Image (cartoon, helix red, strand yellow):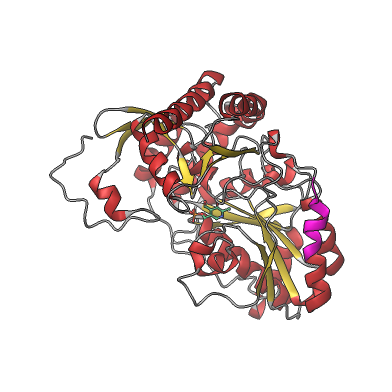
Amino acid sequence: MAYDATNSLEAHWMPFSDNRGFKEDPRLVVRAEGVHLYDHRGGQLLDGSSGLFCSPAGHCHPKIAEAVAKQMTEYTYVMPFQAGHPGSFKLAEKISRMLPEQMNHVFFTNSGSESVDTAMKIVMAYWNARGETRPRFVSRERAYHGVNIGGVSLSGMVKNRDIFHATVPGVMMLRHTYDPSETFIPGGHSEHNGVELANDLERMAQTYGGNNIAAVFVEPVAGSTGALPPPKGYLQQLRKICDQYGILLVFDEVITGFGRMGTAFAAQKYDVEPDIITMAKALTNGSIPMGAVACRDDIYETVVGSSKRGLTEFFHGYTYSGHPAACAAGNAMMEIIEEEDLIQRSADLIPYFEDALMDGLKGHEMIKDIRVAGLMAGVEVHAEGGPGMRGTELQKRMFWDGLSVKFTGDNAIIAPQFIATRDHVDEIVGRFRKTLDHMLANG
Ligand code: PLP
């Protein structure tokens, strides 16, 4: 579909965007296929961030297109409360087979943000069912847990919360785990003080009483704040302290879920079993909005078992929970993951990706740090013109230089699709560097 320049762009209030700047220099994608996007001026771009880390199987995958199109001719909507359709049961079953063993129940939402808020409500319902009052949640500085009011309350990214005052009370923050003195660590496997940083939780438990803390929410790899891998021992120590005080551990795997770490979930990569996992994004290859929350079986049993009049009901849900189109896309995606061996492909590409980034970008005058965790890297540029200004400018320039990359502040998050080849990785790194070089030479 061609872009009609006579159409006004004014009416659409864009999310997380410089609305005026964008409308003066619009960057519209009008077609996509595999690893490529096509802009409204006819240019081809390489997708360096898998959309927003959500399209690992490549854009416009025919299997998903067919499944959704077929679904749209069979039934387009089914009431999800006290009714259902086969697609959601099938999908939940498939997801549960990828999850840690004790997690066999999946609740559907429509986004990562809804998954986080749903997880908070599962936690609250669980403690309520157990007859315990645990009013505090723990999160981490620099965390991103979506934009709904629960997730914003857990957010440690100041810009996402400082203009919103009505957040959930009782949230305490662990220190963030990024140590700027440990820059350029290939693989991001910092050896440094993981246990000591996780012991923040121990201090909170000692200060406020461990039995007042309902849950700890953590991204196994902090994504949106710049791809910060966990220091060694960090997640394990959080698990240990949670066990000690009966605190629930929630992994927000909205980015890391479905293979980005080279394993189905980061829980498996880091060998730590959380009690609850949130997911979204790659679940449908980004094609239809969908999220999900999985929890340990005993949490599910406790919550549904406690509902009034023995109805095993959880008083929560969305009109579009388990929507047929999303389930069709999700089921197709789960089959693609298996048939195309996508998780193994991600695992196989990770070492090459790491080397390519370090070889191609380390030492560049404009780059401050590179962190790699799985098939995701934070490439941080030196700030200039105020925090995030350079990142915003670079994102624009890279688009017109043929590379789509997500910047968050002054961090580029490079996250290739799992179908990307080594040549594609080289091309991503090459184009990234070319824009930096050009900016350095010409301002
Ligand atoms: N949680 C994490 C860890 C995320 O990275 C994101 C989005 O990037 C979200 C939650 C929110 O997901 P959504 O944008 O689908 O609401």
Q: Residue furthest right?
A: 244
Main secondary structure found in the magenta portion: helix
Q: Which residues are magenta?
A: 192-200
Which residue is depicted at the point 63% across and 32% down?
343
152 to 358, vertically: above or below: below
User: Does the rendering let one see residue 217?
Assistant: yes
Relative to 186, is 441 on the left or the right?
left
Front-lying residue, 48 or 281 = 48
Q: Quadrant of the C terminus?
A: top left
- Tell whether 240 sits left or right of 417: right
Looking at this view, name the residue that lies furthest to the left: 6
| Residue 193 among magenta residues | yes
Quarter holding residue 379: top right
Quadrant of the snapshot with the N terminus:
top left
User: Residue 228: horizontal and vertical position, in percent?
Assistant: 64, 47
Q: Position of residue 96 (x, y in %)?
A: 66, 47
Is residue 342 toward the left or the right of residue 28 in the image?
right
Q: Quadrant of residue 67?
A: top left
Using the image as rendered, state which of residue 307 and residue 266 is in the foreground: 266
Where's residue 167, x and y in %? 54, 74
Residue 118 x/y as whole percent: 57, 64
Image point 29% across, 40% down: which residue? 28
> Magenta includes 141?
no
Q: Residue at x 70, y 36 (%)?
A: 185
Residue 34 makes an appearance in the image: no
How many marks on residues? 0
Residue located farthest toward the top when viewing the structure as drawn: 423
Is residue 51 shown above or below 428? Answer: below
**Which residue lies at the image location 83% right of the left edge and 54% below the top edge?**
195
